[in-house]
Structure formats: C-alpha cells, structure tokens
Amino acid sequence: MANIYQYPLKIDRDLMDKLKSIADEEGRSVNKQIEFIIRQFLKSYENGNNQ
C-alpha cells in the first residue's frame, strides 16, 4: 500500500467549484487534481531555487 497521508482541507467554496470544473476537464478526481497542482508547484519551486 502506498504511503498516503490524509489531511482535512478547508477551502473556499468558489475555489473548490473552480477546482472541480478543472479536474473534470482534466479527467481527474478533485483529490488527484490537488495532488497534481502541489507536485507542479514543488517542481517549479525546486527548479527556481536550484534545489
């Protein structure tokens, strides 16, 4: 089994609605879309800080 950490996320309803819409367009669940966005951010952050 994968090493999965569960975290309860409180998020603005309008933001969640937009996220759901994008996740549908991308063929992902909202959870997988959030994970995708976080991975993209971390990659960008690490590349920008030469880590």
Image (tube, helix red, strand yellow):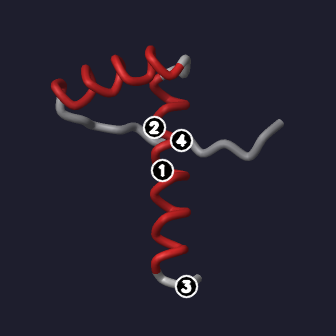
> Under tag 3, what secondary structure?
loop
Amino acid type at mark 3? Asn
> Under tag 2, what secondary structure?
helix
Residue at mark 1 = 38
Q: Do the residues labelled 2 and 1 touch (CB within 8 Å)?
A: yes
Q: Are marks 1 and 4 in contact (CB under 8 Å)?
A: yes
Q: Distance between the residues labelled 1 and 3?
A: 18 Å
Q: How far apart are marks 3 and 4 (CA)?
A: 21 Å
> Under tag 1, what secondary structure?
helix
Q: How far apart are marks 1 and 4 (CA)?
A: 5 Å
Q: In which quarter of the image is residue 50?
A: bottom right
Residue at mark 4 = 36
Q: In this view, does 51 lie above or below 21?
A: below
Residue 34 marker? 2
Give the mark toward the camera: 1 or 3.
Answer: 3
The one nearer the camera, 12 or 7, is 12
Residue at mark 3 = 50
Residue located at (58% from left, 82% from top): 51
Q: Residue 40: image x %, image y %?
A: 51, 52
Q: Distance between the residues labelled 2 and 3?
A: 24 Å
How packed mark 4 is, by other alpha carbons closer than 10 Å (few <14, some 14-19, many 20 or more), is: some
